[in-house]
Image (spheres, rainbow, N blue to C red):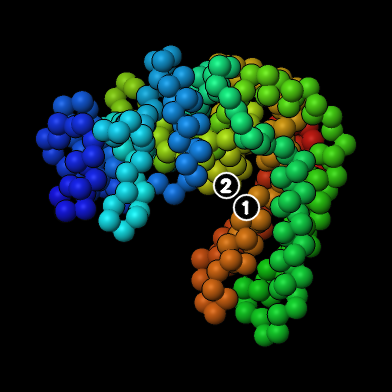
Amino acid sequence: MNDRAVSLLEQYELNITRTYKGRGCILCETEEGLKILQEYHAPQQKLVLMEHLLKNVSALGLVDVDSLVPNKEGTYTVKDRDGVTYVLKDYYEGHECNPKNREELSDCIHTMALLHTGMFYPKEEALGDIARFDLKEETARHNRMLRKIRKYVRERGSKTAFEQFLLSEYDVFLKRAEAAEERICKEDFTSFYQEVEKQRSFVHGDFQYHNVLMCGQRRAVVNFERCRFDSRIGDLALFLRKIMEKYEWDMPLGEKMIQEYEAFTPLKEAERRQLFYRLSYPEKFRKIVSTYYNSNKAFQSLVYGEKLMAVCAQEEKKQNFLRKVFDDVIE
């Protein structure tokens, strides 16, 4: 263990028996169980959210979570000599969910449903100025950025092969994004959002297969730094989209995952509409475009061209999936 790790871990009341490096972290075997030391880049306010939410989930005992470990001063962050911030969390022996294993994907869906039973901010704690997620506002913001980036690409002089390909496909996806925004604006989600606010519902915010650990008969969910004030549909939509993209919008698999979630906790009609819109929006295209815009234009990776081609190739399958599962589609 290097001097930096020693100075950081000395700030905790721990009886450490062994340490070893993980991916961007240090794992610590202690008499109090396995711990993980990681850099922390989210706002300090998120630590308060995580503390309360993870205590709620842990109290139910249904799902293991990487709860924060306080240091000797009772706070949750420590800094090294360079001013880099770290947190220490509980961790668990296990392997990340394998997206190629459909049984483990089913486990993820069940784990998500169990997690959501405890993802509520305590009534006795002040929420402060934490903004609730709003699909209409989020979609409008994304579409403003898409229009800005299209203008930027159009005005570039000498265009790369990727930029030429991007422009050739841009209007199709932007049209669909704008049609989604128009449809969302016509929906009345007032009661839906009132229920989210009344329950103080939160989501993991990055519920993907690599954040679910298979630990024998137990399941653990880790990395809550992106948790947000949102309906459970936020997690379900993200997980479904990621898996469907890997399986090219496989109809039976997608239907099965939704049914498995609903077997534990049925979706209300407004939640199904939210799920439809969140899956309908061309999010993968938006992310590729955003990454391109924020990258070094002197270097265009072939990877992004391949990702864009994959999105274009899957679009018809995605529309068929939405039409079959939700009996609706945004043209």
Q: Residue at x 27, y 56 (%)?
A: 81
Where is residue 302 shown, x and y percent of the image?
Answer: 52, 70
Q: Residue at x 62, y 23 (%)?
A: 200
Which residue is the site of mark 2? Answer: 245
Q: Are marks 2 and 1 in contact (CB under 8 Å)?
A: yes
Quick one: SS at disc 2?
A: helix
Where is residue 159 shown, x and y percent of the image?
Answer: 66, 81
Q: Residue at x 47, y 25 (%)?
A: 52
Residue type at mark 1 is: Lys
Q: Is residue 148 above or below residue 240?
A: below
Q: Residue furthest bottom?
A: 158
Mark 1 or mark 2, which is nearer the start of the sequence? Answer: 2
What numbered label is drawn on residue 3? none
- How far separated are the C-alphas under marks 2 and 1? 9 Å
Q: Residue at x 76, y 57 (%)?
A: 144
Q: Is residue 294 left or right of residue 46?
A: right
Is residue 48 or residue 261 the one in the foreground?
48
Which residue is the site of mark 1? Answer: 284
Quick one: SS at disc 1?
A: helix
Q: Is residue 248 above or below residue 224?
A: below
Where is residue 4 shown, x and y percent of the image?
Answer: 21, 53
| Residue 191 seen in this snapshot | yes
| Residue 213 seen in this snapshot | no
Residue type at mark 2 is: Glu
Q: Residues within 10 Å of mark 1 (few under 14, many from 20)?
A: some
Quarter of the rendering containing residue 306 = bottom right
